[in-house]
Amino acid sequence: MRKFNFRKKQVSAKDQSLQEEIVNQYFDELDLGNLPETNNHGVEFNSDKVYSRIADQIDGGSKIKTLTKQWLVAASLLAGLCLSAYLYRNDILNYVSPIATKQITAANGKIVTITLADGTKIWLNGGSKLTYPDKFRGDRREITLAGEAFLDVAHDDHQSFIIHTGAVRTQVLGTSFNIKAYPEDHFVKVDVLSGKVGVIAAANNAKKSQTVFLTPAQEVIFNKDNNQAIKTEMVDVDVLVRWKSGDLVFKRMPLPEVINTIEHRFNVKIDVDINLVRCSITADLTNKSLETVMKVLSKIVKGKAIQDKGRYRLKGKGC
């Protein structure tokens, strides 16, 4: 077979090998080796031109395929960027346009009311602090509470409402309930007036994370020390939340919790003998002075209240 001098192009080794293979196969099929250098018409056969024309056609097809692949890659990258932008849109928005965080505090003896951006109403009891965003973004509405609050949460199926109280968080869609979570207390207590509430305690070394669901007239108390939960049925929540109207009413409430409530109401410190901590108090002390309140408690515990340098000490035989 006649040998042809191929014109070399600036192509990759892989593309050049493919070109030569196809062109050689084409010439083999034509069997040009038996043809004279010139034909009967005196026209010389130019192998370089023939090769160049075939190679140009191959190059044209390769360029189209390469261009198509480039467009596919570009489209894939664009789709990936769009998906990432959608998934992380809130993070991007928070970076570009951050939401301001606000904080409100209710001083001892005071009750503060506030309405959040979503319409949720909150009553903040004395000695409590609430941290919340100026507006809500994304699929969650999150606030942080230290103290006691009654919440009437605006219903939203697409945005759950989460209250953080230390290691315990309470999650709802729309309901009304009371949370007591003062930093000095050894417990977090949640009582439900309406709707359904999920209370989740974070895992610790001794116990895994657990969730307790509550419906109206139910209560859960999480012990901060051992992460144990005690759930109670048939709770008189109406009496329990009368504090938001300024009332001071107790119904079978443990004495330590009663003392804590009185301390925040009257901005006073009260020490209690250890033998009285199991006492349970039922009393309506609305509009009573601190002196009267301490006299009533002294009578219930069969003891007396001693005042010294602005503090009280409650002593007694026990209940």
Image: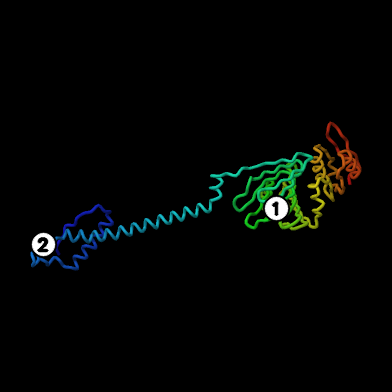
Residue 147: image location, x then y, percent: 73, 44
**Position above or below: 298 against 220:** above
- Residue, x 11% and y 66% (percent of image)? 35
Residue 195: image location, x then y, percent: 72, 57
Q: Secondary structure at mark 2?
A: loop
Residue 165: image location, x then y, percent: 69, 46
Q: Name the residue beneath numbered marker 1.
A: 153
Instruction: Give 170 or 83, whichever is nearer the viewer.
Output: 83
Q: Amino acid at mark 2?
A: Glu
Q: Quadrant of residue 158?
A: bottom right
- Residue, x 56% and y 44% (percent of image)? 97
Badge 1: few (under 14), some or many (20 or more) residues near its Cα, within 10 Å?
Answer: many
Q: Quadrant of residue 316?
A: top right
Q: Name the residue beneath numbered marker 2.
A: 44
Badge 2: few (under 14), some or many (20 or more) residues near its Cα, within 10 Å?
Answer: few
**Position above or below: 19 against 256:** below
**Position above or below: 150 against 295:** below
How far apart are the two marked residues, 2 and 1, measured between alpha carbons?
94 Å
Relative to residue 299, is residue 269 drawn left or right? left
Marks 2 and 1 close (CB-CB < 8 Å): no
Q: Secondary structure at mark 1?
A: loop
Instruction: Give 215 or 33, whichever is nearer the viewer.
Output: 215
